[in-house]
Image: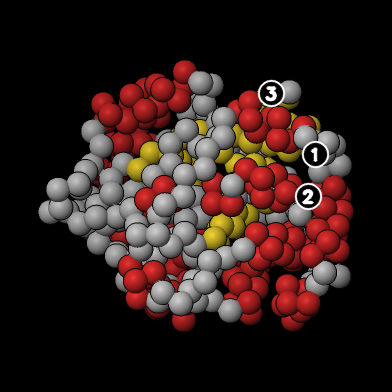
Amino acid sequence: MRLSREEAVDLIKNGDLKSLGEMAYSRKLELHPKKITTFVVDRNINYTNICWVDCKFCAFYTHEKRENAYILSFEEIDRKIEELLAIGGTQILFQGGVHPKLEIEWYEDLVEHIHKKYPQITIHGFSAIEIDYIAKRSKISIEEVLKRLKAKGLSSIPGAGAEVLSDRVRDIISPNKISKDVWLEVHETAHKLGIKSTATMMYGTVETIEEIVEHWDLVRELQDRTGGFRAFIMWSYQSDNTQLKRELPTITKTTPNQYLRYLAVARLFLDNFKNIQSSWVTQGSHIGQLALLFGANDLGSTMMEENVVASAGVTNSMNQDEMIKLIRDIGENPAKRDTAYNILERF
């Protein structure tokens, strides 16, 4: 029997942490009986930091006229990809700010350039709000944007921009951002075109536990319809240098207990997601490791480059060897994967 929303809320509020971990780990082993914990060697490339959306929780973006504003040249992007290839990387996570002036042709040229020059690199890129804005700016449909980018070499899209899929929350923390329905529409459209994606959640701002579970329910329902999500990834709001912290200084810092509690119940509730990622980038390597005992089966990326969380004052890092050691330390079997969760190498 599936967990209902009410049962999930009750588990989060009243469940014993140790018992939640045991239930989530047991469920994980049903899906991953060989105890293989995966990771991917990739690089985040933020092609621009120029953004008009002005999310209050983001410390990364800037405006077009500011001194620190940039758009990376294709040559700069090439250098970053070549550095990634040198350490055995297989994927780039491509995201920017939502640039007010770039249209579909610019994105097509970019994706085509990378795909032709580096066919061994998987392009996992462009959040739902980027895709929606490209459509509006270029006066075409969301479907047309996705079709054209796929034709040029886009492989999959990240879940960024979901935050919490509650319009009440979104109106407070990112009032200029797309609605929850548009986020879901972009991902459903991608799935129907054969473009896989990930589902994400950023908690720790003004949401309630009920809204967290509502978010899970929305992505579970979409996964029932399309099967297009490869993984669920959850992280906590990082407040330093953000407008939201200045406006709402009473928002309390999230705790490891909260993270592990949410993660365990997510594993139980999201029964149609095979992969759940540990967010060591925001939680640190030790809680990231503990997450593997609370339902996560993937450590995510070695994160050769990360700018958005770092802008909010958090700079955790791990390389491949550290990940392998951390996975072995809890009696699991480390493996390097690609974007599609195919195993490339076992250690």
At horizontal 83% and vertical 36% (from top left) the residue drawn is 331
Quadrant showing the N terminus: bottom right
**Which residue occupies the foreground of this view, 303 or 155?**
303
Q: Tag 1, which secondary structure? A: loop
The circle on residue 293 is: 2
Q: Which residue is mark 3?
A: 345
Q: Would you place residue 146 above or below residue 5 in this image?
A: above
Viewed as shown, does residue 286 lie left or right of 49?
A: right
Q: Earlier in the sequence, mark 1 or mark 3?
A: 1
How far from the left and from the top, in percent, is residue 11? 78, 73
Q: Earlier in the sequence, mark 1 or mark 2?
A: 2
Viewed as shown, does residue 105 lie left or right of 279?
A: left
How far from the left and from the top, in percent, is residue 17? 79, 65
Q: Is residue 200 shown to the viewer in this render?
A: yes
Viewed as shown, does residue 7 lie left or right of 345?
A: right
Q: Which residue is mark 1?
A: 330
Q: Residue furthest top?
A: 86
Question: Do the residues bearing badges 1 and 3 touch, measured as CB atoms within 8 Å?
Answer: no
The residues tagged by marks 1 and 2 sit, at their Cα atoms, a distance apart of 8 Å
Q: Would you place residue 181 above or below residue 137 in this image?
A: below
